[in-house]
Image (cartoon, coloured by chain):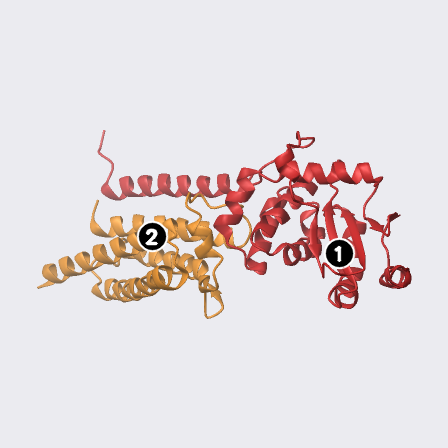
Chain colours: A orange, B red
Amino acid sequence: MNLRMGAAVAALAGLFVSAYLWLYKMGAIGTLACGTGGCETVQLSPQSRFLGVEVAAIGAVGYALLLGLTLASLQPRWASSRRLLQVIAFLSGGAVLFTLYLKYLELFVIHAICRWCVGSAILIVVFFTLILLELRRVRRQST
Amino acid sequence: MAEPSPMKRFYALFGLIAAAGVGFLIWQMNKASTPAVPVQVAVQPADTAGFEGYSLGSDSARVVITEYADYQCPACQQFATVEWPYVRERLVQTGRVRWVFRDFPLSQHQWSRLAAHSAACADEQGKFWEYADAIFAAQPEWSTSRDAGKIFRQQIEKVGLNAGTWDQCMTSLKFAGRIQGSADEGVRAGVGSTPSFVIGGRIYAGVLAYDKIKALVDSLSRAP
């Protein structure tokens, strides 16, 4: 499995994590499988919304976008396109920064840790790293 | 036979993960999230020790009104949303009446005990009255729901409860005995329907309008 395939799997997993949290916020899921109760504390805090939009919804849309772009980059037509990879790297870099901000909120404002959010943070970092490695590989190949 | 291409293998794995993820979400959505509050639970002395209902208002109020109510009863909801705000503002908050709310879950209502338990868990965090108002207001929504627990849980955000503490309380079912004890107390007092109000030692069954309650309070306040 190449790096892009790995990134696509990470984005898919992230999409499910975000969708799970979003469904919870919409009331479609009763209790989060969390164990500590920290997930609910985080999800029900005022910080679970960013500029009036559910953070989980932002995550789901973001992961769906990254997944779609990564799957597109796997197609022969886009396989050698550095531009598309750069766009994915730019977007996922922004997602990593946003995730860092959310981790700051969890640790220092809400004072609770949501395991699912930690899972999502790990997935976006893995995704970003794989895309950077792939970008470097493509650059080396073209030089 | 030719080896499947890496892309085909990837799509197969991708499809498997996607199916597992969708399956997990569907399972989570259909999973009952609601603990069942036992009916006719044996009431232990410790369940009711020191508890005489949820009390609001001045201890020195001349009139004490005890309301026996069921969260799923439409008449109780009508009282809670239409009359109670006036009663609270004009009679309780002015110090004329101390109001006592007691659970009287009716057996025909599927979610009454769960609602009562969720309110007891809100009371642990000092937000009983706010939470009771919220679930009465949302009654049309959860009353016919397959999983009212989800809707009760949504109210905790509105009221500002700590979700983890509330969850632990709900899972423990520690107030099941107290709710039964409250219902038993109502039966002993002669309550047979909801809402019922005990005012000046007499039981008034059915929704009481604010004006009627005020007239009774005026009358009892004048009594020597």
- The location of residue B189, given as percent across then percent down, is 82, 40
Mark 2 burial class by Cα count in 10 Å: few <14, some 14-19, many 20+? some
Tell me if B34 is positioned left or right of B9 in this view. right
Distance CA(mark 1)–CA(mark 2): 46 Å
**Numbered circles on residues, count:** 2
Please state which amino acid type lies under the numbered disc 1: Trp
Identified at 44% across, 58% down, the residue is: A56
Residue beneath disc 2: A118
Mark 1 vs 2: CB contact within 8 A: no
The residue shown at (70%, 42%) is B112
Residue B217 lies, in percent from the top left, at 86, 61
Q: Residue B132 in the image: x percent, y percent?
A: 67, 54
Residue under the image location 44 percent in, 43 percent down? A33
Q: Position of residue A61 (x, y in %)?
A: 42, 59
Q: Residue B31, can we see it? A: no
- Position of A3 relative to B39 (above/below): below
For disc 2, the chain is A
The answer to which image quadrant residue B3 occupies is top left
Q: Chain of mark 1?
A: B
Between B126 and B60, the residue placed more toward the observer is: B60
What numbered label is drawn on residue B155?
none
Give the residue at mark 1: B99
Q: Residue furthest bottom?
A: A51
Q: Is residue A86 above or below residue A2?
A: below
